[in-house]
Amino acid sequence: MKVDSRLVIIAIIAVVFIIDLVWFTPRQIRTFFGMQSEIRGFKEKITQFNKEKSHKHQYIADKLRVEEDIMNLRSLILTSQDIPKLQAYLSRRAKENGVEVEEIRSAPPQIYKTVGESKFFSLPIHMRLVAAFHSVGKFLNAIEGGEYFLIMKKLSMRGSKPYHRVNIDLWVILKE
């Protein structure tokens, strides 16, 4: 019996195809689906990275803004050498708002708070003024929103229209 060579080739191809279909294709399918889940995981990680990257830029901008705010706030806290400058500032603001200053005096500083190695002091300042009621309000508004941390502790007004005698006790925070 003579075997047809074409038939042998077709049979070999059929056997290889069946082995591929039974043995290799399921493995390839499992590997493909396994890779799909890995690809999804990578896509999620890339998306999360892009979100965090955009947040990082926002965090950096926020950090720079906060550092600038801290530097600005630090410049508002005076030292004991700045007391004459503060008194000149209060006199200037009073004059700008139509308030006559009769007296500005400060008491000795008192320890207010210790933060780490830094010490902060409260400096009581007493002011005696003569002014119209609305001028006092404008003056207080000007110094409250002004260049320094000033805390009004006490205010008393006596007198009649148009001018009142005003006593103000302020606290100023000083750093060592």
Image: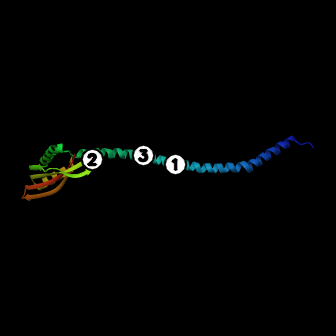
- Looking at the rendering, in which quadrant would you find the N terminus? top right
Name the residue beneath numbered marker 1. Answer: 45
Disc with the residue nearer the chain's start (1 vs 3): 1
**Residue found at x 45% / y 45%:** 53
Q: Type of residue at label 1? A: Lys
Seen from this angle, which residue lies furthest right?
1
Mark 3 highlights which residue? 56
Compute the Cα span from label 1 to label 3: 16 Å
* Marker disc for residue 103: none
Asked if residue 108 lies left or right of residue 6, the reply is left
Q: Position of residue 74 (x, y in %)?
A: 26, 45
Q: Residues within 10 Å of mark 3 (few under 14, many from 20)?
A: few
Q: Position of residue 64 (x, y in %)?
A: 35, 44
Identify the amino acid type marked 3.
Lys
146, 19: nearer the viewer: 19
Tell me whether circle 1 and circle 2 mark residues in contact (CB < 8 Å): no
* Residue at the image point whose x is 42% and y is 46% from the top: 56
Q: Is residue 98 visible?
A: no
| Place of residue 2 in the rendered image (x, y in percent of width and height, measured from the top left) | 91, 42
Crowd rating for badge 1 (residues with CA inside 10 Å; few <14, some 14–19, many 20+): few
Image point (61%, 48%), residue name: 35
Label 1 – label 2 distance at C-alpha: 45 Å
Q: Which scheme is used to colour this image of the protein? A: rainbow
